[in-house]
Amino acid sequence: MKHKELKDRVVLISGATGGIGKALSTLLAERGCNLFLCGRKEEQLTEICKTLSNKDVRCFSKTCDVANEKEVEKTVEKAYKIYGKVDIAILTAGILMKNPLEKFSSKIIKESMMINFFGNIYFFEHLVPHMIKANSGTIAVVSTLADQRGYAGWSAYQSSKAALSIASECLRLEAKKHNIEVITIKPGNVSTPMIQNQKGMGIVSAEKAATIILQGIEQGREIISFPLHQVIPVRISDKLPAKFYDKIRSLF
C-alpha cells in the first residue's frame, strides 16, 4: 500500500466553513499543506484562512455555491491561477434534508441532487482536465455509509449520495490510466451542523472523521468507510433480504 506525503501539497476543500471540511482544513494546515477553501459563507472563509495562514502555509478562499456550475468553474480557475495546480481536492459540501412520505416533495429531491450530486460532479468536470494534463491528482468525495439500502424518510439524501458513490466509482476506474486517484469517503454518523438534531449510534467528532480521512488518503485507499462500529452492522444489513430488512428498519 503506497503512502502519500501531504506536506507542501495544494489542497482544495469544498464545504470548508464547517463540519468535516473545517476540521480537514485545520489538520492539513498542521501537515504543511497549502490550502484553497470554498464555501458559501465569505466571512467564515476569510476568518479560517486568516487563522491558518503562516510562514509555512498559504491559504486562499472563494465563496462558492456548489449547485451553481459557473461558480464551481470560477473556483477551480482561481485555485489554478493562484497555485498553478491542485494536488488534492476533498469535496465535503452537502445538505441533509428529510423527505417523509406524508410531505413528500420532489423539490427536496432536486435540491439534494443539485448539491450532493451535481455539486461534486461539477468539480470533477472542471478539475479532471487539469489533472489529466498533469498526469496526477486526487479527488476525494464525501458520500455516505448508507448508500446501498434505504432508510425511511431519507429518500432525498440517500438517493443523491448513492448516485455519487456509483459515479465516483465509475470515474475511479477510468481515472487510473491518467494516474488520478478518485476516493469515495463513506462516513457514518459524524457530529456536524447537518445532524445536530439527529440521533445516531456512536456519533464520532468531525475532528476524528478528518483524521481518518487523511489517513485513508495518505494510504491511497479507494474507499474510506468509518467508523468501524457503524460499518459492520450497516454492511450486514445491506445483505439482508427485503422482508427481513424492512422488519429491522421498522424498529428505528
Image (tube, grey):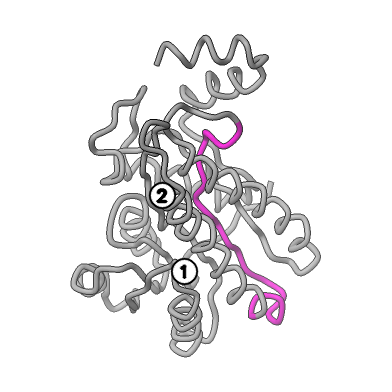
Q: Earlier in the sequence, mark 2 or mark 1?
A: 1
Q: Is residue 250 magenta?
A: no
Determine which residue is flagged by label 1. Answer: 11
Looking at the rendering, the stretch of residues picked out in magenta corresponds to 130-148
Residues at badges 2 and 1 in contact (C-beta under 8 Å)?
A: no
Give the image quarter of residue 104.
top left
Secondary structure under badge 1? strand
Q: Position of residue 19 (x, y in %)?
A: 31, 50
> Residue at the location (62% across, 72% down)?
125
Determine which residue is flagged by label 2. Answer: 108
Along the line of sight, the residue nearer the viewer: 46 or 147:
147
214, above or below 151, in the image: below
68, above or below 103, in the image: below
Q: Is residue 14 left or right of residue 137?
A: left
Type of amino acid under label 2: Ile
> Residue at the location (59% across, 51% down)?
164
Q: Position of residue 83 (x, y in %)?
A: 47, 84
Q: Is residue 63 left or right of residue 78?
A: left
Q: Residue furthest right?
A: 177
> Label 1 neighbourhood size at 10 Å, few (<14), some (14-19), many (20+)?
many
Q: CA distance from mark 2 to mark 1?
A: 31 Å
Location of the C terminus by quadrant is top left
77, above or below 67, in the image: below
Give the image quarter of residue 36.
bottom left
Type of amino acid under label 1: Val
2 or 1: mark nearer the eye: 2
Along the line of sight, the residue nearer the viewer: 187 or 217:
187
Q: Position of residue 29 (x, y in %)?
A: 35, 64
